[in-house]
Image: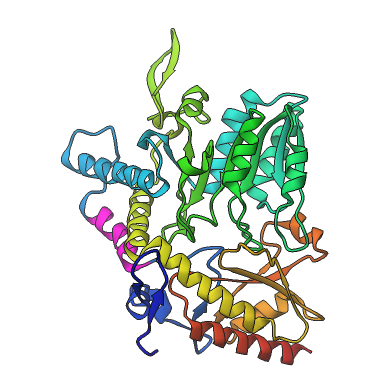
């Protein structure tokens, strides 16, 4: 590949985005698939991991593997400092007011379930309403359905327009004094639509409702400021932000977290335990972090966020915008191809169907040409059914993708469609 340096338009001087040097940090990008150079366009499912993040695991397990918070020896102190260092890193990444507002989970799914089972189980009753959007991932649908079946509240769905953007007029009409929570994603994993969550939060708060934001697809692509948004809860996953699987974050407003009961019981989340007088619980965030956590994964998450900030979140966002524009223009020339999700405000996700060709066939055949995309319902079955399809092909972009890869992807797509038809 030629040495590529991209000029990205930022607020002041143009930043130098050295794509070639950046790609060298990702070992997996050196491999071949079916005899072809790997082109990885499944970033909305899981982003790849740079070497500095990979190195965290070797460093932790070879130098200071120990349990955290409890030990007084050197290794325990070092592990605890590194673990809590990530909490401080996440605080800055989200612009949270206090590091105690940052709770480590296994991912966005567990974070949403934590809110449902702790806050929701105690605050939602018959007659109450929870608003979710048609754009939601199953992880922001099913937990509320399970709880609604038990607690008797009502779920209402915010519709989308033909472009895949939320119908904000309908949202305003759905809000009422019965609304207790709005649960919405910041960016749609299936379409790439960026939702106006700051406006949605302000409207929800006018009715005394809270807002929970699934930020799994926003955190990799744009700067997130939970104080500016005025989010009550915000969640994201490590493996979307160039970090490891099995770790994620729940941010919550301090007063809410302090009032919520623990979700899981065990070590670390207690203050005192007694057979005679019962148990008292630790302060936040530890009240919600029962048992030994994924220590190395949390430390690696901190390193991943440091890597993103080193590259520049705004620079990544700008480059992905270039990739999305180029890919959208190119696939629009493919005969019989229809893009799902054409909202004017989008992140780096391109979802499409091709007349007469099943998405799974495209996914399997394009893999033979070294191109990795996602096919299926993307854990967003209600949304796809709304658009009259059972599955789409989805190409999604990250900091390390190139214009050459986009061109190769489109050429491979045309070749596959020609083979099938």
Asked whether, in this view, residue 253 is left or right of residue 286, the answer is: right
Label the magenta part by its dominant secondary structure.
Answer: helix
Please state which of residues 6 and 268 is positioned toward the viewer in this rendering. 6
Q: Position of residue 23 (x, y in %)?
A: 37, 76
Residue located farthest toward the front when viewing the structure as drawn: 12
Residue 263 against residue 242 in the figure, above or below = above
Is 396 inside the magenta-drawn segment?
no
Residue 22, picture quadrant: bottom left
Q: Residue at x 77, y 45 (%)?
A: 170
Residues drawn in magenta: 50-62
User: At 44% from the left edge and 70% from the top edge, which residue is drawn?
Assistant: 399
Q: What quarter of the picture does the C terminus occupy? A: bottom right
In the image, is residue 395 above or below residue 34?
A: above
Looking at the rendered image, the quarter that the N terminus falls into is bottom left
One can see residue 5 in this view? yes
- Residue drawn at (36%, 58%) of the image: 304
Colouring style: rainbow
């Amino acid at each position: 590949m030629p040495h590529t340096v991209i000029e990205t338009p930022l607020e002041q001087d143009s930043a130098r985005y050295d794509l070639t040097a950046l790609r060298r940090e990702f070992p997996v990008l050196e491999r071949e698939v079916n005899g072809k150079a790997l082109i990885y366009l499944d970033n909305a499912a899981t982003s790849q991991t740079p070497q500095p993040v990979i190195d965290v695991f070797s460093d932790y397990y070879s130098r200071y593997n120990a349990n955290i918070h409890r030990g007084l020896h050197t290794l325990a102190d070092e592990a605890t400092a590194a673990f809590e260092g990530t909490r401080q890193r996440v605080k800055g990444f989200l612009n949270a007011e206090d590091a105690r507002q940052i709770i480590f989970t296994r991912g966005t799914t567990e974070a949403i379930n934590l809110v449902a089972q702790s806050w929701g189980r105690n605050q939602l009753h018959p007659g109450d309403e929870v608003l979710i959007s048609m754009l939601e991932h199953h992880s922001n649908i099913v937990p509320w359905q399970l709880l609604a079946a038990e607690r008797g509240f009502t779920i209402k769905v915010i519709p989308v327009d033909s472009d895949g953007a939320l119908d904000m007029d309908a949202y305003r009409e759905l809000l009422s004094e019965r609304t207790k929570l709005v649960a919405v994603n910041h960016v749609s994993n299936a379409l790439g639509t960026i939702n106006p969550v700051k406006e949605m939060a302000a409207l929800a708060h006018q009715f005394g409702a809270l807002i929970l934001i699934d930020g799994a697809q926003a955190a990799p692509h744009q700067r997130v400021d939970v104080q500016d948004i005025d989010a009550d809860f915000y969640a994201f996953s490590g493996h979307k932000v160039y970090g490891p699987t099995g770790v994620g974050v729940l941010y919550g407003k301090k007063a809410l977290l302090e009032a919520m009961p623990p979700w899981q019981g065990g070590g670390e989340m207690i203050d005192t335990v007694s057979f005679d007088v019962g148990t008292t619980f630790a302060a936040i965030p530890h009240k919600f972090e029962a048992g030994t956590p994924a220590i190395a994964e949390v430390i690696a998450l901190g390193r991943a966020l440091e890597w993103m900030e080193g590259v520049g979140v705004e620079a990544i966002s700008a480059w992905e915008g270039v990739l999305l524009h180029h890919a959208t223009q190119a696939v629009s020339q493919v005969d019989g191809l229809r893009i799902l999700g054409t909202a004017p405000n989008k992140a780096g996700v391109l979802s499409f169907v091709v007349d007469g060709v099943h998405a799974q066939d495209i996914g399997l055949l394009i893999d033979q040409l070294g191109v990795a995309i996602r096919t299926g319902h993307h854990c967003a079955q209600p949304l796809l059914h709304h658009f009259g399809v059972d599955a789409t092909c989805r190409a999604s972009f990250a900091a390390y993708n190139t214009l050459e890869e986009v061109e190769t992807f489109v050429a491979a797509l045309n070749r596959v469609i020609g083979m099938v038809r």
